[in-house]
Image (cartoon, grey):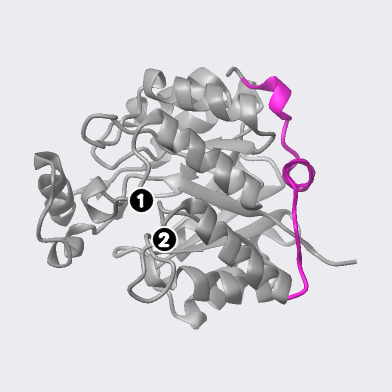
Amino acid sequence: MARKVIITCAVTGSIHTPSMSDHLPVTPQEIADAAIGAAEAGAAIVHLHARDPQDGRPDQSPEAFAPILKVVKQRSNCVVNITTGGAATMTVTERLRPCATFKPEIASLNMGSMNFGLYPMLNRYKELRHDWERSYLEGSRDRIFRNTFADIENILTTCAENGTRFEIECYDIGHLYTLAHFVERGLVKPPFFVQSVFGILGGIGAHPEDVMHMKRTADRLFGDSYRWSVLGAGRNQMPIITQAAAMGGHVRVGLEDSLWDGPGRLAKSNADQVRRARQILEGLGCEIATPDEARELLQLKGGDRVDF
């Protein structure tokens, strides 16, 4: 029997700004349509951020998420993953509000504070439409993306009664050990959904040895109690998912992580990247997990137990 692989699609995040691609969804309708298109292309999970529809600024208010969640819920059976990462400019309280309000099946959770360098993008994008974009990118030169032990514990305990599981985002090896700490304390229950992030300035690199090192460490710490997924930032996206899929992992793509669909070619939609990932996975002899199969693999509570 072919192995089932979960495709997560990160539809719109806080890394890229609207000036970087005309294909980046911004309005609630655009984000909802992009999520549904990704699900129809084969993504079992859609990972969502929200934006101000006027200028594309990251917006972590429940009011910004509500219209997106309503449409996606009505039109798709996909698993909806709400970010608690938001943007590094936000407080943890702000970042947590949508997850606490809507009680999703799964939410992202960053496993450590880090430098999160976006400022090199200014060398590639000279003309930006909105005033906030330049200061947002430049500010990452001297900004720490805060995720302290207290912050992580706050998110875990706030959502403990909601039945929400977490996409545990690990940007470096130390983040795996932080997860092991919270597992030892009983605040995270198996199976853990570990999302290894490669190629962000300030985190682990995107060399094949980095991918193998992350997997070896997770295997040693968690054995068969976890499900491993990967994402590669920018041009690293497809090489990273190909290597990880061959190593038994699940994959994440989407315009949050990369704007590209090949050298020098912008992806016109999130669905484009999902289709390309699907082609790679099926070429490796894998089958694409449906949303319900993903729910079973990750032991999620089900789409009928969310508050949206």
- Dot 2, how many residues are within 10 Å of its Cα: few (below 14), some (14-19), or many (20+)? many
Indicate the secondary structure of the residue bearing disc 2.
Answer: loop
User: Disc 1 residue type?
Assistant: His
Could you tell me which quadrant the C terminus lies in? top right
In x, y percent, where is residue 242?
59, 74
Left or right of 280 on screen, residue 261: left
Q: Is residue 188 magenta?
A: no
Mark 1 or mark 2, earlier in chain: 1
Q: Nearer the viewer, residue 33 or 69?
A: 33
In x, y percent, where is residue 134?
11, 49
Q: Which residue lies at the image location 23% right of the left edge and 29% below the top edge? A: 54
Q: Is residue 182 visible?
A: no
Could you tell me which quadrant the N terminus lies in? bottom right
Dot label at residue 161: none
The residue to which callout 1 is attached is 23
- Dot 1, how many residues are within 10 Å of its Cα: few (below 14), some (14-19), or many (20+)? some
Q: Which range is magenta?
A: 284-306
The residue to which callout 2 is attached is 267
User: Disc 2 residue type?
Assistant: Ala
